[in-house]
Amino acid sequence: QVQLVESGGGLVQTGGSLRLSCAASGSIGSINTMAWYREAPGKQRELVAVITSSGRTNYADSVKGRFTISRDNAKKTVYLQMNSLKPEDTAAYYCSMLTLPVYWGQGTQVTVSS
């Protein structure tokens, strides 16, 4: 069993920054491909950023140049640095381990005020 615990969400003004963390624990030997998703009220959950075990990254067009995903394999933790935040970034952010089965964290709320 794998547990993913997100932290770092909160309320921030437009243009501000937040760093989300996702700590993995349980029956895992190493961190596999990890991703951050977000879900805004009334919208489908969308992929924000992905990072492979080797460190390759990919981003949604809406966050390119503003968000950075990274990982610390020794700590089994993945991060999402979010800069230049906009009100449209407001959502619940979920960490995911892209294995079979896929594991999800409980989510952390990010609210960007205008």
Image (cartoon, rainbow, N blue to C red):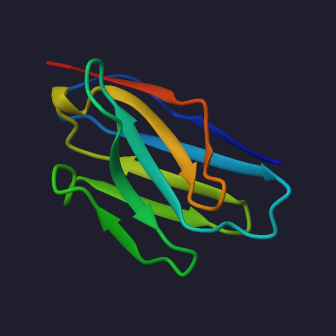
Position of the C terminus by quadrant: top left
Q: Residue at x 37, y 37 (%)?
A: 38
- Which residue is at 27% across, 46% downward? 83
Image vertical order of residue 11 relative to residue 57, above or below = above
Outermost residue, bottom side: 54
Residue 30: image quadrant is: bottom right
x and y, in percent, of residue 27 in the image: 86, 57
Residue drawn 24% across and 56% down?
Answer: 60
Left or right: residue 96 versus residue 69 is: right
Q: Height in image: 68 above or below 80?
A: below
Name the residue: 49% across, 77% down: 55
Picture coordinates of residue 37, whole percent (x, y): 41, 44
> In the image shown, does 78 or 97 lie closer to the viewer?
97
Q: Position of residue 31 (x, y in %)?
A: 67, 66
Task: Give the left or right position of residue 55, taking residue 24 as reference.
Answer: left
Q: How many marks?
A: 0
What x and y, as percent, mark residue 81?
39, 50
**Residue 68, located in which quarter of the rendered image?**
bottom left
